[in-house]
Amino acid sequence: MRLLLLIAFVFISGSVAGQEIARNETDKYLKVKVKETTWEALAMPFKNALRFRCKMLDDRLYVEFRVTLHQAFRVDEGDEVYLLLDNDESVPVICVRGGVANYDYAPSASFWYGDYLYKITDEQKQKFLEHKVVGARVDVGGEYVTFDKVKEKNAIKFQKALTLVTQ
């Protein structure tokens, strides 16, 4: 019985422990301390995907979202991602580095994707650590793409990533 419980614990903890620091260094050109996590999935419905990684640049906290869609799009500076929390609060984070999506063609599937940087305030960080993200709505050039099903394990990875880069 103990062995079964130990195996279950290792399996459960391993399913959310994939988040780790991918970069922790001082940029030799800008002399800025850079700390960032690995990319992880936040929401991945059938056709679209939303991935994230958290990063600290000196004392500024950011989340970088990788948006993947099956249509051309852009994200402009000032556009927002609304993160819906498990207490029904919607928290907007503002894009500070936008751009036009890149096209990737493969015989089995083609898609558009882009990486966009959003500033996280201390107040927002606290909300994200206290409540899990259950959904996201991304502003892509004045239209919205909604990701309604954020799995709990992905929400936990988001919280862990915020903690990792701010330690």
Image: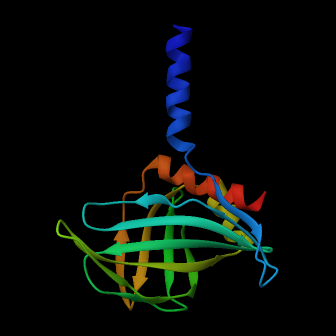
- Would you say 23 lies left or right of 112 here? right
Q: How is the image coloured?
A: rainbow
Name the residue furthest left. 107
Residue 6 in picture, x, y percent from top left: 56, 18
Q: Is residue 32 left or right of residue 14?
A: right
Query: Residue at the spot x=40%, y=60% of the render?
Result: 43
Of residues 155 and 167, the one nearer the viewer is 167
Identity of the residue furthest to the top in this view = 1
Above or below for 151 versus 110: above
Q: Quadrant of the C terminus?
A: bottom right
123 vs 17, nearest the viewer? 17
Q: Residue at x 30, y 60 (%)?
A: 45
Q: Position of residue 160 (x, y in %)?
A: 63, 52
- Residue at (56% x, 10% y) in the render: 2
* Nearer-the-camera pick, 118 or 144: 118
Tell me the quarter of the picture where residue 77 sits: bottom right
Q: Is residue 69 above or below residue 152?
A: below
Above or below — where is 115 with respect to 74?
A: above
Residue 102's spot in the image, x, y percent? 37, 83
Q: Is residue 50 left or right of residue 61?
A: left
Q: Position of residue 84 (x, y in %)?
A: 49, 65
Picture layout, residue 100 above or below residue 62: below
